Amino acid sequence: MASVLRSRPDLPPAHRGFAFAAVIGYTAVFHGVAVVLVAWFTAKTWSGRRWARIALSSYLVTASVLGLLSATADTPFLIVVVVTDAIHLIMLGLLWLPPSVRSYFQSGRASFGPE
């Protein structure tokens, strides 16, 4: 909320409650959808779906870029952004770098089509 007040110091006090509720609501819905997507992509990746591995990787790259943009916006959650970006990079590495993972997805055991 502090960032909203910094960016809009002329926001009337009567509208601040709505702005706060809107920010909290948007954040809750956005992150709720993200959690569901990551859980679904992870489950499908775990079951050998190649499309899910690509989708999860795309999500992780997008989340990392948005995290970096958030970090440059003078966020009070800088440490959270840094930690989550580090986790995203570790997950990306684990999805693509280990030879056993690469061979699993290149073999006939994994599937590219829908389940």
Image (cartoon, rainbow, N blue to C red):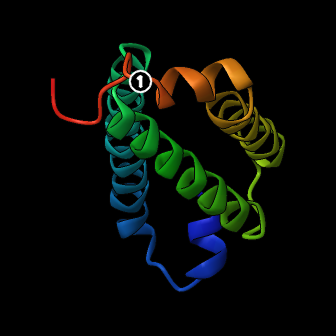
- Can residue 2 be seen in this snapshot? no
Q: Nearer the viewer, residue 84 or 101?
A: 101
Q: Is residue 43 positioned above or below 59 on the image?
A: above
Quadrant position of residue 7: bottom right
43 left or right of 94 in image: left
Q: Which residue is mark 1?
A: 45
Q: Position of residue 114 (x, y in %)?
A: 16, 32
Measured as percent of width and height from the top left, residue 50 is found at: 38, 34
- Which amino acid lies under the numbered mark 1 shown in the image of this protein? Thr
Q: Is residue 77 left or right of residue 52?
A: right
Q: Quadrant of residue 103?
A: top right
Eyeballing the image, is 30 above or below 87?
below
Q: Nearer the viewer, residue 102 or 3?
A: 102
- Report the residue that reaches farthest toward the front: 108
Mark 1: few, some, or many residues within 10 Å (few <14, many ≥20)? many
In the image, is 101 to the left or to the right of 110? right
**Going by the picture, which residue comes out furthest to the left?**
115
Which residue is at 48% across, 48% downward? 59
Question: Going 61% across and 29% down the picture, which residue do you hit?
Answer: 102
Q: Give me the residue at 37% from left, 22% from top.
A: 108
- Report whether residue 33 is seen: yes
Q: Secondary structure at mark 1?
A: helix
Q: Quadrant of the C terminus?
A: top left
Q: Nearer the viewer, residue 100 or 61?
A: 100
Between 65 and 102, the one nearer to me in the picture: 102
Count of picture labels = 1
Specify the quadrant that holds the N terminus. Answer: bottom right
Q: Position of residue 78 (x, y in %)?
A: 81, 49
